[in-house]
Image (tube, coloured by chain):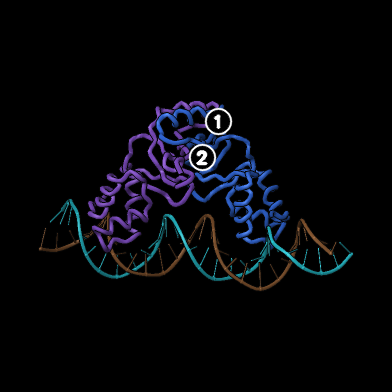
Chain colours: A purple, B blue, C brown, D cyan
Amino acid sequence: MIKHSRQRECIKDFLANRYDHPTAETVYLNVRKEFPNISLGTVYRNLSLLTKLGEIRKLSTGIGPDRFDGNTSPHYHILCTKCGSVMDLEIENIDHINTLAGSGFDGEIEGHVTYFYGKCRNCLEK
Amino acid sequence: MIKHSRQRECIKDFLANRYDHPTAETVYLNVRKEFPNISLGTVYRNLSLLTKLGEIRKLSTGIGPDRFDGNTSPHYHILCTKCGSVMDLEIENIDHINTLAGSGFDGEIEGHVTYFYGKCRNCLEK
DNA sequence: TTGCAAACAATAATGATTACTATTATTTAT
DNA sequence: ATAAATAATAGTAATCATTATTGTTTGCAA
């Protein structure tokens, strides 16, 4: 049975208002403004729980630590290979690649994760 | 300037003959048969170097430690969500998704990484 | 309002990976 | 072929991200 906690609510609220997909460490440093004694373990535990509940999304980009996204609607991400930022990406539905993959695999395809990489506008101009 | 090393060659050979995308730890345990004194650091250092040289590929699936692939030809991977195995996947070219992504992003798309997930034949039958 | 499980803070432990250092191996120049 | 230069190694320590442990506090149902 899950009990409400002000710490978890604060973590969720924080993510709901961020669009840069912060790491656990960043969440920790910010939530500390409201809960000076919160521990990093509490942040990790709640990020895991919220991810399991489907209330946030975890991004494992392969570059640096995991990041978290308060926006659970279906969308993709792009990583700037220069500055390292992770941005949302509007793209039409590409679930047909699951079907393509299925025809070359003896088993069942359930889904995919895709990270695009490239250079953001800001880095291109430097 | 890069110097040849028998350890690095052994690591590369080992990967060239494996099709299950082993972790650094697995590479270490196997290469030890030929080099009993090789250190895990040497394995990691060479896996990084070979990846940078483009002679092997690193797979960061987000589940467990990084894995390595001696096959650098373009192909995709599927992770079985039950047994955790990582398998090669034959699929026609899907680079058009880069174009789709590009039209919704103010910047330059260079590529993408995609991991499919699902259930392998073996797990489906249990 | 009491009891109990869930969540907490503090901290230790773990797993994966990288860094350091003295020695060894490979290449280059004699 | 030999010696000098330096890249790579083995062994080990350190770091980073994350998870586990433990005693205390909090939320909530009886």
Instruction: Please tell me how crowded label 2 is: few (under 14), some (14-19), or many (20+) other residues with Cα within 10 Å.
Output: many
Q: Mark 2 points at which residue?
A: B79
Name the residue: 63% across, 44% down. Answer: B54
Q: Nearer the viewer, residue A91 or B8?
A: A91
Three-letter amino acid code at the position of disc 1: Asp
Can you tell which quarter of the image residue A43 is in? bottom left
Question: Percent position (x, y) of residue B87?
Answer: 57, 38
Chain letter of disc 2 in the image? B
Instruction: Using the image, tell me which numbered label, if any, was put on residue A106.
Output: 1
Instruction: Using the image, tell me which numbered label, if any, was put on residue B56.
Output: none
Instruction: Please tell me how crowded label 1 is: few (under 14), some (14-19), or many (20+) other residues with Cα within 10 Å.
Output: few
Q: Can residue A60 be seen in this view?
A: yes
Q: Is residue B118 visible?
A: no
Image: D9 above or below B57 = below
Determine whether, in the image, residue A113 is placed left or right of residue C25. Answer: left
Question: Which residue appears farthest toward the front when viewing the image?
Answer: A126
Q: Is there one chain holding both mark 1 and mark 2?
A: no
Determine whether, in the image, residue C23 is placed left or right of residue A121. Answer: right
